[in-house]
């Protein structure tokens, strides 16, 4: 959560700069964490075919595993799984930052438990 909050805060701070620092990381976390709930909601309304996007999660885990297996060895699989699962926590932190910003709160007021 803290990383997602930091990504969103730094991204917002540097929104006008050409580097767009951490904007990509923030968007990536929000996108990956939106696939599952959107897919489940759509499948309840329109049918089970909308569960197909859930296959993106294991596909991404496999992609990260194969990309990192030479460098990480035995840690490639856990790293791949945790990288994908961690997007949900990153997204929660980013959303907390945005919610606080809309409410007019400063970032230092957030507590993570």
Image (spheres, rainbow, N blue to C red):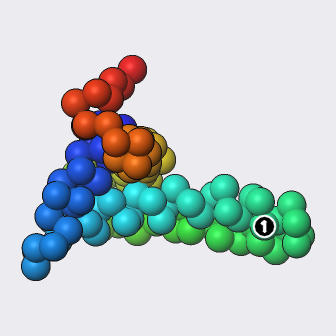
Quarter of the image containing the C terminus?
Answer: top left
Residue beneath the point at 23% across and 59% down? 12
Residue beneath the point at 32% across and 37% down? 105
Quarter of the image containing the N terminus?
Answer: top left
For the view shown, which residue lies furthest in the top direction? 113
State left or right for residue 50 relative to residue 79. right
* Residue 19 drawn at (x, y percent): 10, 74
Total residue callouts: 1
State left or right for residue 63 relative to residue 5. right
Where 106 sits versus 88, above or below? Answer: above
Q: Decide: few, some or many residues near mark 1? Use Cα within 10 Å; few <14, some 14-19, many ≥20.
A: some
For the view shown, which residue lies furthest in the front direction? 104
Instruction: Report the residue marked by disc 1.
Output: 42
Instruction: Find numbered disc 1 in the image and state the secondary structure of the residue it sits on.
Output: helix
Residue beneath the point at 45% across and 59% down? 30
* Residue 102 drawn at (x, y percent): 40, 49
Q: Nearer the viewer, residue 16 or 36?
A: 16
State left or right for residue 63 relative to residue 23. right
Residue beneath the point at 66% across and 56% down? 37
Where 109 sits versus 66, above or below? Answer: above
Residue 82 appears in the picture as rendered: no
- The quadrant where residue 14 appears: bottom left
Q: Nearer the viewer, residue 104 or 38?
A: 104
For the view shown, which residue lies furthest in the left direction? 18
Residue 25 appears in the picture as rendered: yes
Q: Nearer the viewer, residue 107 or 54?
A: 107
* Residue 89 drawn at (x, y percent): 43, 42
């Amino acid at each position: 959560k803290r990383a997602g909050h930091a990504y969103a805060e730094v991204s917002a701070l540097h929104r006008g700069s050409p580097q767009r620092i951490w904007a990509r990381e923030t968007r990536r976390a929000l996108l990956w964490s939106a696939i599952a709930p959107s897919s489940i909601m759509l499948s309840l309304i329109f049918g089970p075919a909308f569960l197909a996007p859930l296959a993106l999660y294991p596909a991404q885990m496999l992609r990260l595993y194969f990309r990192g297996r030479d460098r990480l060895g035995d840690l490639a699989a856990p790293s791949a799984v945790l990288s994908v699962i961690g997007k949900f926590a990153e997204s929660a932190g980013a959303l907390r930052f945005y919610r606080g910003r809309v409410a007019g709160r400063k970032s230092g007021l957030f507590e993570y438990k």
